Image (cartoon, rainbow, N blue to C red):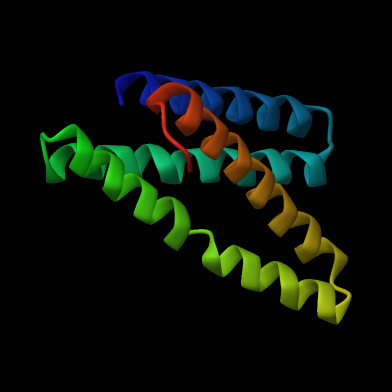
Amino acid sequence: MEELMRELEAKVAKATQSAAALKAEDRIDDANLEKIRANVYGIFVSVLQAAAKQSSDEAERRAFFERNLERIPSGWRIARDKAEERGDTVRLVQEDVKLAALDEVEQAFRELWGTEA
């Protein structure tokens, strides 16, 4: 769990730095997408922290994280589908960025916690 926490915190820092650099270059739209990415990573850092507070049992922590890995992005998928239906390309790109970051979180989870997401 600690390794996954470090990985996600590093992703938050990298995306936050990237957002600041893009903003300095006056690339506001790109900076906003990096902020979205950082927020997704940050959400799952918070989930890991909540799991640690909830239980000292590794299996319970893993189960808590897995439940939230499914629950949290369900709204993102719905929002993406609605944006696609409406032809809202800005919202579609934003939801795609969230889901791409989610894929990275799931991959890190599988690699570092040794289970399928």
Q: Residue at x 53, y 66 (%)?
A: 74
Quarter of the figure that contains the N terminus? top left
Quadrant of the rendered image containing residue 38: top right
Q: How many numbered callouts? A: 0
Residue 20, position as x, y percentages in the image: 67, 29
Quadrant of the rendered image containing residue 65: top left
Residue 37, position as x, y percentages in the image: 62, 41
Q: Give the answer, above or below, for where 37 lies relative to 95.
A: above
Q: 99 left or right of 74?
A: right
Q: Which residue is drawn at 43% across and 62% down?
A: 71
Q: Residue at x 36, y 55 (%)?
A: 67
Residue 46, position as x, y percentages in the image: 34, 42
Q: Which residue is drawn at 73% across and 39% down?
A: 31
Q: 90 left or right of 10?
A: right
Q: Give the answer, above or below, for where 19 lies relative to 32.
A: above
Residue 48, position as x, y percentages in the image: 31, 38
Among all residues in the image, which is located at the extreme bottom? 86
Q: 49 or 22: which is nearer to us?
A: 49
Q: 69 or 101: which is nearer to us?
A: 69
Q: Give the answer, above or below, for where 66 lies relative to 108.
A: below
Q: 7 left or right of 55?
A: right
Q: 92 left or right of 112?
A: right
Among all residues in the image, which is located at the extreme left? 56
